[in-house]
Image (spheres, rainbow, N blue to C red):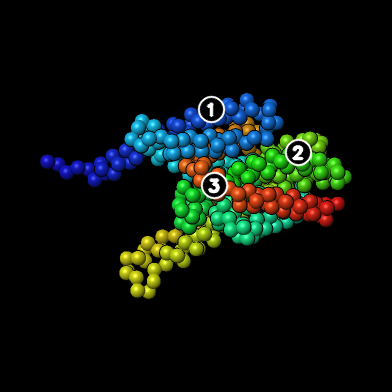
């Protein structure tokens, strides 16, 4: 009997693995269509302040908690949860990173440079100070390390998108999620909830405070753009001040997003170094331990390099508007799918039991980012 072709078994195995992803991918796709429609219907009510990413995470968390907590094992619903698991896991990782790459096409370096050195200095001081302060406050409050890092990233950079990018880096650190991937998903849910709650409060408070403090439209735009978390929240807040404030706030916000790449790359490098030190074999370890320790993750995640490349492409000014507009819509679609997939792994009851310290961290982080940004605006952009 002729021997089987050596690639037959691997090919069959790959086909089975790919087929196993289909139910979860189909669920994420269907949920994305529905959630984008719901977000559009709610936009007139919320003024666009409710991010569809957060809505997707909530929907996924509700579905995942119901299937994980209240469905009898062995039933149809339980078998459904097992079937969709591989596909939603893949969506939460791969689709998320693709969204981060496409996010770079929304950023143009010449637009950021138009802020001038004073505006850029406001952004850099606010981002660096907020990130460091929130991490320090997280240690003082004994908030889990991954939660503190995600909250610091979301509050200092760009809300849900920044949390998503840092999540991909934390997945490479075996200690980041505390009890494992399930705990990391709870950390992500907590960070996104804080971004939504405190960013929504800022929509109403900051424009009022800008008037009380007598800030000019330019100063108000700088302050709102440098301190409010989500892009939609920045637009909603600055739009109530003036058109000039809105224009300044939007560019300032994009300048913060540009700093996502170095921040995530720095965190990735530190986590990779820690993982390499942890995996280093001892002197008396067997020889076969050395190759495993030598397989290190890249210092800078590939999706971060892709993000930077997209920023450079957009900065050339060669892309037509139809391409950038399509990329923006596609970015939202990918993030919504990834957030829904992440949400399916969130344990809502456990998250509710452990939310008090993260809530306090979010409150203090809000005070830090708004206070630091205001001080920077008054000192550097009088």
Residue occupying the point 32% across, 38% down: 16
Q: Is residue 228 left or right of residue 52?
A: right
Classify 378 as above or below 225.
below
Question: Residue beneath label 1, please?
Answer: 34
Labelled disc at residue 204: 2
Q: Residues within 10 Å of mark 3 (few under 14, many from 20)?
A: few
Image point (36%, 37%), residue name? 73
Q: Quadrant of residue 67?
A: top left
Q: Nearer the viewer, residue 80 or 116?
A: 80
- Give left or right: position of 205 versus 106: right
Q: Residues within 10 Å of mark 2 (few under 14, many from 20)?
A: some
Say the numbered circle drawn on residue 366.
Answer: none
Q: CA distance from mark 1 to mark 3?
A: 30 Å
Asked whether 116 or 222 is in front, the reply is 222
Where residue 242 appears, as percent x and y from the top left, is 81, 36
What is the x, y in percent for residue 114? 76, 47
Chain-order first, disc 2 or disc 1: 1
Residue 236: quadrant of the picture: top right
Q: CA distance from mark 2 to mark 1?
A: 29 Å
The earlier-in-sequence mark between 1 and 3 is 1
Furthest residue to the right?
214
Residue 197 in the image: x percent, y percent? 66, 41
Q: Secondary structure at mark 3?
A: helix
Q: Is residue 345 visible?
A: yes
Q: Is residue 112 visible?
A: no
Extreme-left residue of the structure: 1
Identify the residue under disc 3: 353
């Amino acid at each position: 009997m002729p021997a089987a072709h050596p690639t037959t078994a691997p090919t069959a195995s790959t086909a089975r693995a790919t087929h196993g992803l289909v139910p979860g991918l189909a669920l994420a796709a269907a949920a994305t269509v529905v959630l984008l429609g719901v977000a559009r219907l709610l936009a007139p009510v919320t003024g666009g302040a409710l991010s569809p990413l957060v809505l997707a995470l909530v929907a996924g968390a509700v579905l995942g908690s119901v299937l994980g907590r209240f469905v009898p094992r062995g039933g149809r619903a339980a078998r459904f949860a097992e079937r969709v698991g591989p596909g939603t896991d893949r969506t939460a990782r791969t689709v998320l990173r693709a969204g981060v790459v496409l996010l770079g096409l929304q950023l143009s370096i010449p637009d950021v440079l138009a802020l001038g050195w004073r505006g850029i200095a406001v952004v850099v001081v606010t981002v660096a100070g907020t990130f460091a302060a929130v991490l320090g406050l997280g240690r003082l409050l004994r908030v889990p390390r991954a939660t503190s890092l995600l909250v610091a990233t979301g509050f200092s950079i760009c809300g849900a998108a920044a949390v998503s990018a840092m999540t991909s880096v934390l997945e490479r650190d075996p200690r980041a999620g505390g009890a494992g991937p399930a705990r990391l998903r709870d950390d992500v849910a907590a960070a996104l909830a804080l971004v939504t709650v405190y960013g929504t409060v800022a929509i109403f408070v900051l424009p009022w405070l800008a008037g009380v403090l007598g800030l000019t439209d330019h100063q108000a735009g700088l302050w709102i753009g440098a301190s409010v978390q989500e892009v939609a929240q920045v637009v909603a807040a600055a739009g109530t001040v003036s058109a000039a404030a809105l224009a300044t706030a939007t560019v300032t916000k994009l300048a913060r997003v540009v700093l996502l790449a170095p921040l995530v790359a720095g965190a990735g490098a530190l986590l990779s170094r820690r993982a390499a030190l942890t995996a280093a074999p001892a002197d008396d370890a067997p020889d076969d331990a050395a190759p495993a320790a030598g397989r290190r993750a890249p210092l800078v995640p590939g999706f971060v390099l892709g993000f930077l490349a997209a920023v450079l492409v957009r900065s050339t000014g060669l892309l037509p508007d139809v391409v950038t507009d399509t990329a923006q819509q596609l970015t939202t679609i990918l993030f919504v799918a990834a957030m829904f997939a992440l949400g399916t792994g969130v344990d809502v009851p456990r998250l509710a039991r452990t939310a008090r310290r993260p809530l306090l961290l979010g409150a203090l982080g809000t005070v830090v980012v708004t206070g630091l940004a205001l001080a920077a605006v008054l000192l550097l952009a009088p």
